[in-house]
């Protein structure tokens, strides 16, 4: 595989834009329809990876955390991109296959922490990422919406300080950092809270609590 002193990023989604901005002149951001020469980083939806990888044999790496293609290495940043360069110090970077050292170094320069992820574990790894990110966001947004429906507008930063403090506590103390009525075994509070929720949310509330 060619040296990755400079390379193209295919895909102008949030990940592609953020990484291109962070790398500056080292990376050229192109649409998914482009056909550049040299090394190519595929920052496209999973469904487009296989077709594009065939066009760049031996000179591409993809960003998918779930998909594995034999002979095509991947580097998955374990973060949520918003389209702009961010502070990624200490953010895991899952490497599967023979990811070129130059690209790994480029990610290290941005603060990412690479680790080897076996191909067979990728779907589980990605499912865990979805639980911790996408599903957590759904719960957070849902809680805010349920309050809004009842005319409750929390002042300041709303639920954000609670979510952030919870994550800090769990990061510091592990399972012992959890709080709340399920952890305390407070059945009366759990029942009262559950009764206040709409049916679908009640089921989610109780099932997650039981877990």
Image: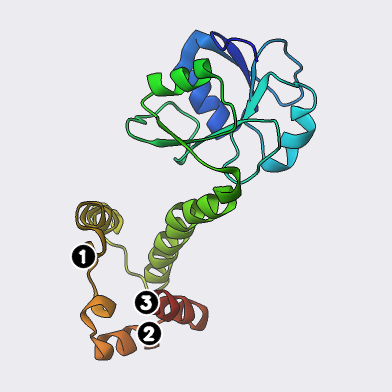
Which residue carries the number 2 mark?
194
- The N terminus - image quarter: top right
SS at badge 2: helix
Q: Residues within 10 Å of mark 1 (few under 14, many from 20)?
A: few
Q: Residues within 10 Å of mark 3 (few under 14, many from 20)?
A: few
- Residue nearer the viewer, 165 or 66: 66
Image position, residue 61 (x, y; %): 63, 26
Tag count? 3
- Please tell me whether residue 10 is drawn above or below residue 116 in the rendered image: above
First reached walking from the N terminus: tag 3 or tag 1: 1
Q: Which residue is mark 1?
A: 176
10 or 78: which is nearer to us? 78
Q: Secondary structure at mark 3?
A: helix
Between 149 and 194, the residue placed more toward the observer is 194
Which comes sooner in the sequence, label 1 or label 2?
1
Give residue 141's position: percent from left, percent from top.
43, 60
Q: Is residue 42 visible?
A: no
Q: How is the image coloured?
A: rainbow
Question: Residue 79, position in %: x, y?
Answer: 44, 40
**Residue 118 as seen in the image, left or right of residue 114:** right
Residue 165 position, x and y percent, is: 22, 55
Instruction: Give the left or right position of residue 29, taking residue 195 as reference.
Output: right
Q: Say which label, 3 or 2, has the lower sequence index.
A: 2
Task: Give the residue at x 56% y 20%.
Answer: 100
Residue under pointer 3: 209
Query: Splitting the image into 4 quarters, where does residue 50 fall?
Result: top right
Instruction: Reply above or below: 115 against 170.
Output: above
Q: CA distance from mark 3 to mark 1?
A: 15 Å
């Amino acid at each position: 595989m060619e040296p990755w002193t400079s390379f193209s990023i295919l895909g102008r989604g949030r990940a592609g834009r953020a990484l291109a901005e962070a790398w500056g002149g080292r990376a050229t951001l192109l649409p998914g329809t482009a056909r550049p020469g040299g090394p190519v980083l595929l920052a496209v939806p999973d469904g487009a990876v296989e077709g594009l990888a065939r066009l760049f044999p031996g000179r591409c790496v993809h960003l998918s955390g779930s998909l594995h293609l034999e002979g095509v290495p991947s580097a998955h940043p374990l973060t949520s991109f918003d389209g702009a360069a961010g502070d990624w110090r200490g953010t895991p970077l899952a490497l599967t296959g023979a990811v070129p050292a130059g690209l790994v170094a480029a990610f290290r320069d941005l603060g990412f922490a690479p680790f080897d992820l076996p191909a067979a574990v990728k779907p589980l790894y990605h499912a865990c990422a979805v639980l911790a990110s996408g599903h957590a966001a759904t719960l957070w947004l849902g809680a805010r919406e349920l309050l809004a429906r009842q005319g409750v507008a929390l002042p300041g930063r709303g639920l954000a300080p609670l979510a952030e403090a919870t994550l800090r506590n769990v990061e510091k103390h592990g399972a012992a950092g959890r709080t709340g009525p399920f952890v305390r075994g407070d059945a009366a509070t759990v029942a009262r809270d559950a009764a206040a929720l709409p049916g679908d949310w009640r089921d989610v509330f109780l099932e997650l609590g039981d877990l």
